[in-house]
Image (cartoon, grey):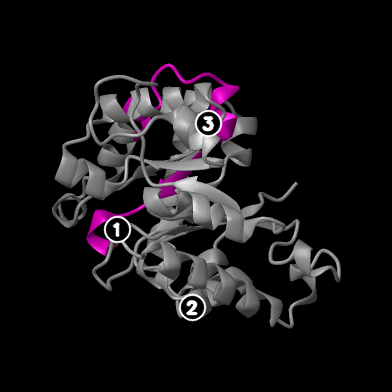
Amino acid sequence: MPRKKLIAANWKMNKSIPESVSFIDNFKNSIKSTKIKDFRDTENPKDFPVSSKNEIVICPPFASLNEVKKSIKGTKIKLGAQNMHFEEKGAFTGEISAPMLRDAGCEYVILGHSERRAYFDETDGIINKKIKAALKNKLKAILCIGETLEQRESNETKAVIKFQLENCLRSINNEEIKNIVIAYEPVWAIGTGKNATPEQAEEVHLFIRGLLKKLYNVDISENIRIIYGGSVNEKNAKELLAMKNIDGALVGGASLDPKSFAEICNT
């Protein structure tokens, strides 16, 4: 069975609550106007905007979670968060836990994003704890891994990916891994306007699938979704998503515009 495509919007620290609601309204209208028949499940507007062939996740700032949840009600759009703490409660000022995200209506959470690693000193060990906490609380994790420009130019891409994947997935069993999406995000292509070519991205995705085969088994490696992130936009999405081992996209800047994001989803 073909892997279901996943397109996730990571708004990062952007959009006020009113702006978030406005985005969802415009996004739904942009999707409704598509001429692609397979993007519609029925003629009932409440069933827009996602067909059974793909999945769309919106990850707004924490402050907008509740209003976005209300705005996507009646559609098949999923709600996600951009981060969480690995503890369920306690004296962690400014943090949010997995149970809180579940209560807020989240089904997904992004973990290990390069900006969390770079600006907040998150290690693979911390990310591993977060993944375990997310899975325990019935959240699906979008695990981000990727190399810097210096590492790529030093031919260390595969070594970095292997190290990150093995350590972030430490003690994650064969059942738990089924609720994880791997997002390959070359750090040098995030927010820079640069982008890995479809062939470069496909090569790393295939390598990741091979690693998962060794860590788990053939069935898991063939069925787990591996998505690409790094300056994905409406102009390059079609070529990237045409690659055999690229199962979707984690979209940053282009996800802030409803029409651009709709075009990526329609692709």
Whether residue 149 is in magenta: the answer is: no
Label 3 vs label 1, nearer the camera: 1
Which residue occupies 63% across, 72% down?
Answer: 28
Label 3 vs label 2, nearer the camera: 2
Q: Residue furthest right?
A: 43
Please state if 158 lies on the left or on the right of 251 as rendered: left
Mark 1 crowdedness (10 Å alpha carbons): few <14, some 14-19, many ≥20: few
Q: Which residues are magenta?
A: 165-189
Callout 1 secondary element:
loop
Q: Which mark is residue 66?
A: none
Callout 2 secondary element:
helix
Q: Answer with the quarter of the image where residue 39 lies.
A: bottom right
Vertical placement of residue 223 versus 58, above or below: above
Q: For the residues labelled 3 and 1, say whether their Cβ atoms are less than 8 Å apart.
A: no
Callout 3 secondary element:
helix
Q: Which mark is residue 13?
A: 1
The quadrant of the rendering that contains the C terminus is bottom right
Vertical placement of residue 17 versus 3, above or below: below
Whether residue 181 is in magenta: the answer is: yes
Label 1 vs label 2, nearer the camera: 1
Q: Which mark is residue 213?
A: 3
